[in-house]
Amino acid sequence: MIKAAGLTLLLAIVAAGCKSTTETGYEPRKLGDSAAVQRGYYARPFSPEARAAAAERQVEFSNRRPTDWRP
């Protein structure tokens, strides 16, 4: 009987801590970026990692951007 009560209490504690927002209501966005772009988030502004991330973001932006498709 004590084991069941302990298990129920444990499940209630775990379920209370499972939410995707913070106390202020901020909901973090999922990062779908590549590893180079994610490293660029934390790199120094003019480091090679930051330059590589910026270059990759620019290439991806130009690939998504609509082009002039006149025949």
Image: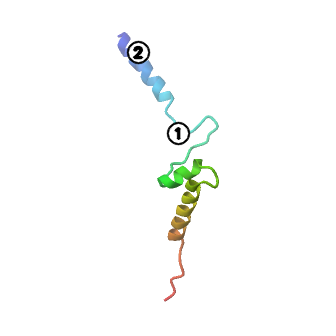
10 Å crowding of disc 2: few (<14), some (14-19), many (20+): few
Residue shown at the point (48%, 23%) measured from the top left:
13
Residue 7 x/y as whole percent: 39, 19
Assign the N terminus to one quadrant of the image: top left
Q: The disc labelled 1 sits on which kind of residue? A: Ser
Residue 15 position within the rendered picture, expressed as x and y whole percent measured from the top left: 46, 29
Circle 1 Cα neighbour tier, 10 Å, few/some/many (<14 / 14–19 / ≥20): few
Q: Is residue 45 left or right of residue 57?
A: right
Badge 1 is on which residue? Answer: 20
Give whichever of discs 1 and 2 has the lower sequence position.
2
Q: Are marks 1 and 2 in contact (CB under 8 Å)?
A: no
Asked whether 15 or 64 is in front, the reply is 64
Task: Tell which of 38 and 28 is nearer to you.
Answer: 38
- Mark linked to residue 6: 2
Residue 11: % across, % down: 42, 24
| Kind of residue at disc 2 | Gly
Q: Which secondary structure lies at badge 1?
A: loop
The image shows residue 19 at horizontal and vertical percentages of 51, 36
Image-based side of 1 in relation to 45, left or right: left
Q: Quadrant of residue 2?
A: top left
Is residue 23 found left or right of 15 in the rendered image? Answer: right
Q: Which residue lies furthest to the bottom in this view?
A: 71
Secondary structure type for disc 2:
helix
Up-down relation of residue 9 to residue 49 (above or below): above
- Mark seen at residue 29: none
**Rendered view: 5 above or below 31:** above
